[in-house]
């Protein structure tokens, strides 16, 4: 489990050129119904997908750039996932409100009915049912936020809608590192609370200033309105004050939206780093077991360690077999992180320098050891791989293409 998801995500944001401008742009796009949400989800979770793959690069320069060609499809799938969860939550709250209304109706009828005891009992029953459904809706909203996060990451990696609704897979990922995602949730609550306090302070300041101006400037206008002397009311001044108040209020709301968009960006990037621990380059199909599911179960009282497959000669520990991929490799890789999966196993050929390195140096008076030449392979025939060498499976999830012009990146073939 990697620590400091939010700290790492914040460093990535502030090191991105023009990140403040992007926050204001995202807040403006959020005003557009449906399309705005799709674009924002595609943009943020596309950047989070890079973090899950271990690709370290700043935020995409263009909001509508669609560098990987999947901006809108990814955003649409995540929008559908959020919409389904929202519809279910709305149905639960609607049922709760219906029972509350039935309880109020029974309470009102108890005053006009001779059987007030039965009406009071119905009021208590409906109220209890409404409260219970509201509590269930609260728990559903709390749990669904985790599944929406993990489902959005799975959608961004596989670019399929069905990957986001694999609740069993999402639950296995959360159970594997529930502490990490719980820390992200706690930081969302903490940062959201701080932003809420800041917004409340701004709202109080704006309301206080305009209330003072209104009382001081138009106090006499109230008497005219009460007495009905409308001809003496300065309607232009009142209209001007209302217009200025609405403009200032819109500015305050826009600043609050910018802060909220910054929180969403921070959360999405942190989720990308949380997902990286699941060895995303080694993922196969969305229905196949994930790498951590293939590790042997630990015995009681024994720590669980992952036994890596035998390495081919000349291959670094923890590194996948060499291959040629049409995608650019990540710009930076952490030690022990697997590279992009190959499309076919590579033929094994012993290095030419291995035999010379294995012969120890002999003194001048000692007879030199005669080396045995490796078996000659007929022309056109590929040497067979040694026994026990791992066979690399073909990947199903595509790695993100590296940013054009970035240092250490390659263009797709």
Image (cartoon, rainbow, N blue to C red):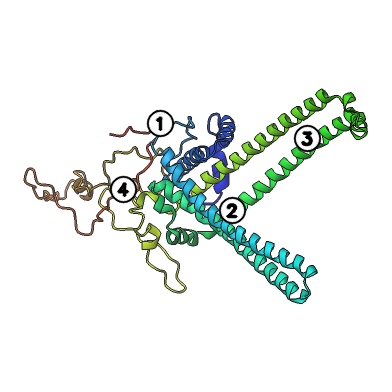
Q: Earlier in the sequence, mark 2 or mark 4?
A: 2
Q: Are marks 3 and 1 in contact (CB under 8 Å)?
A: no
Q: Residues within 10 Å of mark 1 (few under 14, many from 20)?
A: few
Q: Is residue 203 above or below residue 346?
A: above
Residue 352 falls in image quadrant: top left
User: Disc 4 or disc 3, which is closer to the eye?
Assistant: 3
Alpha carbons under labels 4 and 3: distance apart: 56 Å
Q: Position of residue 39 (x, y in %)?
A: 49, 38
Q: Between tags 1 and 4, which lies in front?
A: 4
Q: Which residue is tagged 3?
A: 206
Q: Residue at x 61, y 49 (%)?
A: 188
Q: Is residue 400 left or right of residue 389?
A: right
Sequence-first tag of 1 and 2: 2
Write down the quadrant of residue 114 in the picture.
bottom right
Rounded to the nearest angstrom, the CA distance separating label 1 from label 2 is: 34 Å
Residue that mark 4 sits on: 341
Report the front residue among 99 and 312: 99
Any part of residue 279 in sight: no
Q: Which quadrant of the structure image shows residue 261?
A: top right
Mark pair 1, 4: CA separation? 22 Å
Residue annotated with mark 2: 185
Q: Secondary structure at mark 3?
A: helix
Residue identified by numbered label 1: 407
In the displayed structure image, the side of residue 221 where residue 336 appears, left or right = left
Is 182 rendered above or below residue 331?
Answer: below
């Amino acid at each position: 489990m990697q620590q400091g998801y939010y700290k790492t995500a914040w460093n990535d944001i502030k090191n991105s050129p023009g990140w403040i401008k992007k926050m204001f742009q995202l807040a403006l796009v959020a005003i557009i119904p449906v399309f705005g949400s799709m674009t924002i989800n595609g943009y943020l979770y596309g950047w989070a997908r890079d973090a899950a793959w271990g690709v370290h690069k700043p935020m995409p320069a263009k909001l509508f750039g669609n560098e990987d060609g999947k901006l809108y499809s990814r955003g649409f799938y995540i929008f559908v996932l959020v919409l389904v969860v929202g519809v279910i939550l709305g149905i639960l709250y609607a049922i709760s409100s219906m029972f509350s209304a039935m309880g109020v109706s029974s309470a009102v009828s108890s005053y006009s009915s001779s059987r007030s005891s039965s009406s009071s009992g119905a009021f208590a029953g409906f109220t209890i049912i409404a409260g219970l459904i509201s509590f269930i809706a609260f728990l559903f909203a709390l749990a669904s936020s985790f599944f929406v996060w993990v489902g959005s990451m799975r959608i961004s990696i596989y670019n399929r809608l069905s990957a986001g609704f694999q609740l069993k897979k999402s639950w296995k990922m959360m159970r594997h590192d529930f502490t990490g995602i719980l820390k992200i949730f706690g930081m969302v609550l903490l940062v959201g609370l701080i932003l809420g306090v800041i917004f409340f302070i701004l709202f109080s300041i704006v309301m206080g200033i305009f209330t003072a101006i209104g009382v001081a400037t138009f106090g006499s206008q109230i008497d005219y309105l009460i007495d009905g002397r409308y001809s003496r009311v300065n309607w232009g001044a009142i209209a001007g004050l209302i217009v200025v108040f609405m403009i200032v209020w819109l500015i305050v709301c826009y600043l609050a939206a910018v802060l909220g968009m910054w929180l969403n960006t921070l959360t999405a990037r942190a989720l990308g780093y949380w997902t990286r621990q699941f060895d995303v380059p080694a993922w196969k199909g969305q229905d196949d077991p994930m790498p951590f599911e293939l590790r042997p179960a630990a015995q009681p009282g024994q720590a669980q360690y992952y036994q890596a497959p035998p390495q081919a000669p000349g291959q670094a520990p923890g590194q996948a077999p060499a291959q040629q991929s049409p995608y650019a490799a990540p710009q930076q890789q952490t030690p022990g992180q697997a590279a992009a999966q190959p499309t076919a196993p590579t033929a094994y050929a012993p290095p030419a320098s291995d035999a010379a390195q294995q012969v120890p140096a002999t003194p001048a008076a000692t007879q030199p050891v005669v080396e045995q030449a490796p078996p000659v392979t007929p022309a056109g025939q590929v040497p067979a791989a040694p026994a026990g060498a791992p066979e690399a499976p073909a990947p199903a999830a595509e790695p993100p293409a590296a940013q054009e012009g970035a240092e250490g990146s390659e263009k797709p073939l």
